[in-house]
Amino acid sequence: MGDGFVARRLGGLSDYQLLNGCLEEVRACDEGELWLLCDAQTRLAERVALAESVRRRP
């Protein structure tokens, strides 16, 4: 984009992930910032998915 970079998820997020701060899109001013935001969101989504699976255990 003219005002920076945008990354969107290819796959969807669960309601639990969205409720706990995972984003479907991030925006950044440069490629380095975009990489860091994408990495942070990927790690967050993985951890929240793990928490979601632990939460479902009997």
Image (tube, rainbow, N blue to C red):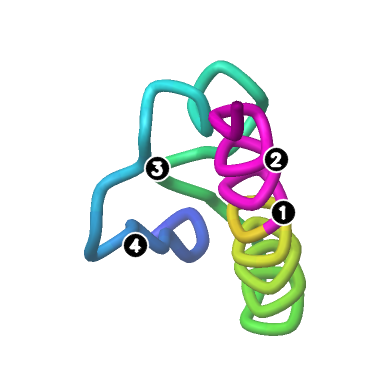
The residue lying furthest to the front in this view is 58
- Disc 4 or 2, which lies upstream in sequence? 4
Label 3 environment density (alpha carbons within 10 Å; few <14, some 14–19, many ≥20)? some
Q: Position of residue 41 (x, y in %)?
A: 64, 56
Q: Is residue 32 above or below residue 55?
A: below
**Of discs 3 and 4, which sits in the foreground?**
3
* Amino acid type, label 2: Ala
Q: Which mark is residue 24?
A: 3
Q: Which residue is mark 1?
A: 47
**Of discs 3 and 2, which sits in the foreground?**
2
Whether pointer 3 and pointer 2 mark residues with C-beta atoms closer than 8 Å, the reply is no
Look at the image and tell me in which quarter the N terminus lies. Answer: bottom left
* Amino acid type, label 4: Met
Q: Which residue is mark 2?
A: 51
Look at the image and tell me in which quarter the C terminus lies. Answer: top right
Q: Which mark is residue 9?
A: none
Distance CA(mark 3)–CA(mark 1): 16 Å
- Disc 3 or 1, which lies upstream in sequence? 3
Which is the main secondary structure of the residues drawn in magenta? helix
